[in-house]
Image (cartoon, rainbow, N blue to C red):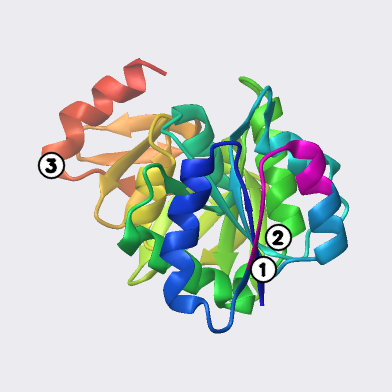
Amino acid sequence: MTVAIIDDEQHCIDRLMHLLEPHSDHVEIVSYNTMDAAQKGVDYLRPDVVFLDVQLHDRTGFDFLSSVTYRDFSLIFTTAYEKYAIEAFKFSAIAYLLKPVDRDDFEFAFQKALDKTEQAQLNDRINVLLSNLSKGDSPKRISVPHKEGYIFITVTDIVRCQADVNYTHIFTSDGKKYTASKTLKHFEQLLDGHQFFRTHNSHLINLGFVASYHKNGYAILFDGTKIEVSTRRRDAFVKACGQH
């Protein structure tokens, strides 16, 4: 198995190489510190796993992904905290590690990368990532895991999310329903800051689709769906609706 590390800082490359030492009996490591070398090396060697730094001199890891022709690898980004990029990673369901890289976080991400199912629709997820990063304030898309791989949904098309134990049903404005293999809490955190409100233990709704609210504790959506708003969340819900 071949692992490629792409980073313009040698001490960051050294850190990842150190963390990979326990796997040295079955892992061959190559590293690149420039965009050009990385492009040529990855296309030639076709690694199984790529650790990719967000910032590469005056270029970015996203530039690398846009230009490389071979993408049949498991991808893990490494980055210093950059809020816009972190959200983009989460929306596209692509793994990332924050610098300085923690050993436990590394092992978790690396073991997931070894699971071939993590490579499912990677090209599509990369395209979602690149699209979200280039759109500015335009509608973002999320990669949603389900039993057959991933589905890709525009955030503003989501009407509501409904909990079903460890799964979530996502209802969209075109009348479709998707079942995701993630909890409602996952989507509450993922969609924070995108006008979604947790009305109840079982529901997360898009405030843009709220038609009315009734004092008996129910919100009516534009599609006619009646959603309960828990007593302790009613004041916050009314306030949130007034801000959108």
Determine which residue is flagged by label 1: 119
Q: Quadrant of residue 99?
A: top left
From the viewer's side, name the closer residue of 207 and 130. Answer: 130
Q: Residue at 75% of width from left, 44% of height from top?
A: 65
* Residue type pointed to by label 3: Thr
Q: Specify whether 55 is left or right of 102.
A: right
- Element under label 2? helix
- Element under label 1? helix
Q: CA distance from mark 3 to mark 2?
A: 42 Å
Q: Specify whether 103 is left or right of 194.
A: left
Q: Residue at 44% of width from left, 49% of height from top?
A: 97
Q: Is residue 243 above or below residue 229?
A: above
- Element under label 3? helix
Q: Quadrant of residue 223?
A: top right
Residue 146: image location, x then y, percent: 57, 69
Count the numbered circles shown.
Answer: 3
Determine which residue is flagged by label 3: 231
Disc on the earlier residue, 3 or 2: 2
